[in-house]
Image: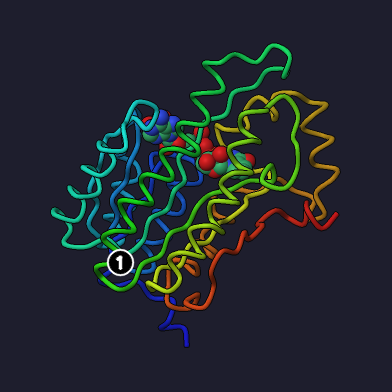
Amino acid sequence: MLNTFRLEGRVALVTGASRGLGQAMAVALAEAGADIVGLFRTRDGSETCAQVEAQGRRFLPLAVDLLTASAQDLRAAVAHVAREMGRLDILVNNAGEIRRAPALEFSEADWDAVMQVNLKALFFLSQAAGEVMKAQGKGKIINIASMLSFQGGILVPSYTASKSAVAGLTRALANEWAALGINVNAIAPGYMATDNTIALRNDPARYRSILERIPAQRWGTPDDLKGIAVFLASDASDYMHGAIVPVDGGWLAR
Ligand code: NAP
């Protein structure tokens, strides 16, 4: 049955593939056999490219700023992918923004930026990819949610709002698209050591209090998402629709 996890001949578009969790998931999908389109904003994607090509897979970089891209831009980006790669089987909506400030001082700019990247771009990329997947009769969409899809968080009101909405949207799209052969699910990572959590990890009190609450007794790493990403991208998860899967060292079970 391990063959049902294999991704040879599939094409995956991974947003935020230049570093952190997106990079690890892109490389994992390549290790399982997929060719990868890596979308990122400004950073150089060459590190991810080298790791994907080392698996003998093709890597296509796509520079798109999700903060400014319109729905039409995202449709054009997906059309470009389908043209260049011949198909699109897997979309990993991973790119994300976080802005920290107390709710009483939170700016409109920080609200809009986070909602645009984490939610609006995710929806319109899914819509464009869903069209291609519908025509193919099969597809996998994996959204990256958060512990703050379940909890309130501290000093991150727009992030919590966006990630809670990602969980709702995952269920809404699953309801509409399951019948089309498209699986829409989400991964909810716990506290992972990436650029996204530098502020927390640089605050010794927050770092310690978070660590003490994690049953697994360690922060997560990008590699911790590799197994679940391949599973949700593969035929092994064909009957899963609308699930929000925590990968959190037991944080939510606490
Ligand atoms: P990260 O290391 O900060 O990486 C963020 C990625 O998103 C980068 O590849 C970045 O591209 C891309 N990105 C950000 N804004 C973008 C934009 N406007 N347009 C295009 N790409 C953009 O973050 P991470 O920790 O890997 O987080 C990945 C996802 O997991 C996010 O959705 C985050 O909210 C979520 N998450 C993280 C944690 C955690 O503990 N780290 C926990 C739960 C959920 P550039 O390199 O070009 O800037």
* Number of marks drawn: 1
| Label 1 beta carbon less than 8 Å to ligand 1 | no
Q: Position of residue 87 (x, y in %)?
A: 21, 63
Q: Residue furthest front?
A: 176
Residue at x 29% of width, y 46% of height: 49
Q: Nearer the viewer, residue 173 or 114?
A: 173
Q: How is the image coloured?
A: rainbow
The residue beneath circle 1 is: 134
Looking at the rendered structure, the kind of residue marked 1 is: Lys
Decide if residue 114 is on the left or right side of residue 233: right
Q: Is residue 191 left or right of residue 88?
A: right
* Towards the viewer: 147 or 122: 122
| Residue 69 picture quarter | top left
Q: What residue lies at 54% left-to-right and 51% top-to-bottom?
A: 169
Judge whether 94 appears above or below 204 on screen. Answer: below
Label 1: how many Cα within 10 Å (few below 14, some 14–19, many 20+): some
With 173 as the anchor, is 72 left or right in this view?
Answer: left
On the image, the x and y values in percent for residue 220 come to: 65, 48
**In the figure, 63 relative to 138: above or below?**
above
Give the image location of residue 247, x and y in percent: 65, 57
To which quarter of the image does residue 42 belong?
Answer: top left
In what element is the residue under mark 1?
helix
Residue in view at x 45 percent, y 71 percent: 178
Quadrant where the C terminus sits is bottom right
| Quarter of the image where one finds residue 157 | top right
Residue 120: percent from left, percent from top? 44, 38
Q: Tell me if 16 is positioned left or right of 82 in this view.
A: right
